[in-house]
Image (cartoon, rainbow, N blue to C red):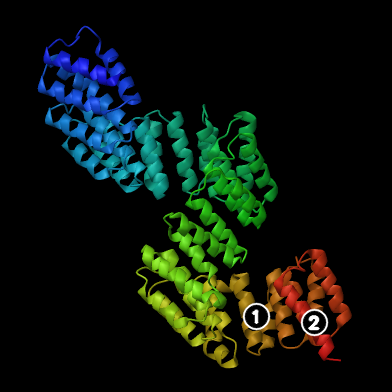
């Protein structure tokens, strides 16, 4: 059809018999339909023929409609080379009206060709609000939000008024960059222009305030909207989820089902993430059921978030069932499986997935390798870890921050401190995780002096410590000399910096003093603790057990129960260790029964402590 159309039009051009009586709109629509459904090559041929045999009416037609439609058709047909040809022909034949240039801007924006779009825009003799907005949308599509804001500022300086699409683009950019000052200014302009009731603008405002961490402001905008669509509801649910207001996100979904009665893949993906964060398996299974009921169980984004939800809930079996049932999988799906296996301590399964991906020829990313490296963070997997490290080098991801951190941690946990330090020193970029990984490695390998030196170097470079840093260094101090040289100064530092208020830091201080032989100081910290958590009690029970004060440890455990503190696997392992030193088998067996009742009997810590308790009775007979 389109070939015959091109032939007829070419013949008309050559004989100057163009059917001028037909309206340009009708001709444009016919051509657009033909181009969209068939091949764009005859269209390019047609432009060449029309340019070769000029006609004033034809030229006007080209400037006002045909080239614009052609450009859009090229964009929709995923043919970049042809689009560039059209641009060249349009420029060559002087057909660059504001309409044609704006359509070309849209074309470059669709394909993420920001430099070409900018060059075209700067060459445009005339620009209108649509041109500026097309440029901003192109930048936004490429993730270049800084340029979106720059374009907006230049547009305002140029005196061009904004429309709803302009505001939507710049509001989204402000949200992504968390530019609060400009975001609030743009919100004021929206109200000034009377566009605060526009659906697209309001949706962008809800998302922006959500990114700012201002969920209440997001809700206020949403609550005053006269019209809402699925995007509106998704935006406000996402705002609550982003700000860890999980109950509000779930309540909002309940209202959405009642008032709007419609949802999409984005809704379910957000809800799955919420359920994973709050570890609500019951809600997560409901979301999964809705996905099946609505026919969205095959949507890859929904499936990937459900995979993550099951992983965070520790339901590896459900995760594997879902993964096997997925009709389509991408690298995110495979990465989720690897991360789950690492979390479950299933190193071989993690490496099997890596091997499968290599066989499939899928291009791996830093997330894949970070999981694979983490799976090898055990001396028994050092050989495999070195092989994965080689793959990282081949893939050119050795300079990636996340992969580098994983490698430092892996070599440290394998006792290969020279290699860990070499990786650390060669990293082009380091963050707090990097420093903590190496400090923690020195602590695990009982090198408190090196850990302290690294801590001092970290502070000299302007990197501020966090509670994990303090826990790692304190864990390295296990002798009276370590306590005197490093532990006590670190205790003072934790008081000065406020880290002493953190439960885990206090726990580490109790443990450090106990391991160093100063149980009196451990008791002093414990007794001065106003609100004690299970972490506090566990540390004190373990400290007394470590010093052979089994009776005192047992008394503390009983006091812990009376205080109605939640018991965990560490509580039971600590008190079982105390009963082992006393060789009181009857009490130990009662405690073992309690571990079964509380569901901790399968814990490795509890199992080992139970074995010690039973063997303690045997050898003390």
Residue at disc 2, secondary structure: helix
Q: Position of residue 73 (x, y in %)?
A: 30, 28
Looking at the picture, does residue 422 appear above or below residue 209? Answer: below
- Res 126 → quadrant: top left
- Count neighbours of disc 2 (C-alpha within 10 A) and say few if under 14, some if 14 to 19, many if 20 or more: many
Which of 463 and 353 lies nearest the eye of the viewer? Answer: 353
Give the number of the mark in front: 2 or 1: 2
The C terminus: image quadrant: bottom right
Picture residue at 41% right of the left edge, 49% below the top: 178
Q: CA distance from mark 2 to mark 1?
A: 24 Å
- Would you place residue 124 above or below residue 457 in this image? above
**Secondary element at image label 1:** helix
- Residue indicated by mark 2: 613
Please give the name of the residue rendered at 50% of the width and 72% of the height, measured from the top-left corner. Answer: 384
Question: According to the image, label 1 marks what residue?
Answer: 510
Q: Residue furthest top?
A: 21
In the rendered view, does 36 fall on the left or right side of 302? left
**Is residue 18 in sight in this rendering?**
yes
Does residue 517 appear left or right of residue 120 in this picture? right
Crowding near the residue tagged with mark 1, few <14, some 14–19, many ≥20 C-alpha atoms within 10 Å: many
| Vertical comparison of 323 with 65: above or below | below
Looking at the image, the residue that sits furthest to the right is 586
Q: Position of residue 274 (x, y in %)?
A: 60, 48
Q: Is residue 439 left or right of residue 462?
A: right
Quadrant in which the N terminus is drawn: top left
């Amino acid at each position: 059809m389109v070939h015959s159309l091109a032939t007829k039009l070419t013949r008309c051009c050559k004989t100057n018999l163009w059917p001028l009586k037909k309206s340009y709109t009708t001709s444009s629509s016919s051509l657009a339909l033909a181009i969209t459904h068939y091949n764009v090559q005859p269209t390019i041929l047609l432009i060449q023929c029309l340019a070769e045999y000029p006609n004033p009416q034809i030229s006007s037609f080209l400037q006002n409609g045909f080239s614009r439609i052609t450009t859009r058709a090229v964009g929709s047909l995923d043919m970049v080379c042809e689009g560039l040809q059209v641009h060249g022909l349009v420029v060559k034949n002087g057909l660059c009206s504001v309409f044609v240039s704006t359509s070309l801007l849209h074309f470059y924006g669709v394909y993420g060709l920001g430099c070409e779009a900018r060059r075209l825009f700067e060459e445009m003799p005339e620009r209108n609000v649509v041109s500026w907005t097309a440029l901003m949308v192109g930048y936004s599509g490429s993730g270049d939000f800084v340029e979106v804001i720059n374009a907006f500022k230049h547009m305002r300086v140029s005196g061009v008024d904004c429309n709803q699409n302009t505001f939507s683009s710049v509001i989204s950019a402000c949200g992504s960059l968390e530019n609060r000052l400009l975001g609030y200014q743009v919100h004021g302009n929206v109200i000034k222009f009377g566009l605060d009731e526009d659906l697209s603008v309001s949706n962008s405002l809800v998302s922006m305030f959500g990114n700012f961490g201002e969920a209440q402001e997001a809700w206020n905008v949403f609550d005053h909207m006269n019209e809402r669509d699925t995007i509106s509801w998704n935006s406000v649910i996402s705002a609550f989820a982003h700000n860890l207001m999980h109950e509000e996100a779930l309540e909002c979904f309940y209202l959405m089902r009642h008032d709007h009665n419609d949802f999409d893949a984005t809704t379910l993906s957000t809800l799955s993430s919420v359920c994973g964060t709050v570890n609500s398996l019951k809600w997560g299974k409901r979301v999964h059921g809705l996905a099946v009921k609505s026919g969205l169980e095959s949507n890859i984004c929904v499936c990937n978030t459900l995979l993550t939800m099951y992983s965070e809930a520790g339901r590896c079996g459900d995760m594997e069932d879902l993964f096997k049932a997925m009709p389509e999988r991408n690298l995110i799906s495979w990465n989720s499986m690897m991360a789950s296996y690492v979390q479950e301590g299933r190193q071989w399964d993690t490496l099997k997935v890596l091997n499968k991906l290599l066989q499939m020829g899928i291009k791996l990313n830093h997330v894949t390798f970070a999981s694979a490296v983490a799976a090898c963070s055990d001396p028994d997997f050092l050989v495999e870890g070195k092989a994965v490290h080689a793959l990282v080098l081949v893939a050119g991801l050795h300079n990636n921050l996340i992969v580098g951190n994983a490698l430092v941690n892996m070599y440290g946990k394998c006792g290969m401190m020279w290699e860990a330090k070499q990786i650390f020193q060669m990293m082009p970029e380091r963050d707090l995780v990097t420093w903590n990984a190496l400090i923690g490695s020195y602590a695990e390998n009982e090198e408190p002096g090196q850990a302290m030196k690294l801590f001092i170097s970290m502070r000299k470079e302007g990197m501020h410590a966090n509670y994990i840093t303090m826990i790692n260094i304190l864990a390295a101090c296990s002798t009276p000399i370590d306590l005197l040289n490093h532990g006590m100064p670190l205790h003072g530092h934790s008081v000065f910096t406020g880290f002493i208020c953190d439960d885990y830091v206090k726990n580490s201080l109790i443990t450090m003093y106990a391991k160093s032989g100063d149980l009196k100081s451990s008791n002093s910290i414990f007794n001065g603790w106003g609100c004690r958590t299970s972490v506090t009690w566990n540390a004190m029970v373990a400290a007394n057990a470590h010093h052979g004060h089994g009776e005192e440890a047992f008394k503390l455990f009983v006091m812990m129960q009376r205080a109605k503190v939640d018991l965990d696997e560490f509580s039971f392992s600590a008190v079982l260790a105390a009963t082992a030193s006393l060789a009181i088998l009857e009490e130990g067996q009662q405690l073992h029964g309690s571990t079964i009742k509380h569901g901790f009997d399968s814990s490795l810590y509890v199992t080992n402590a139970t074995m010690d308790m039973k063997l303690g009775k045997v050898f003390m007979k």
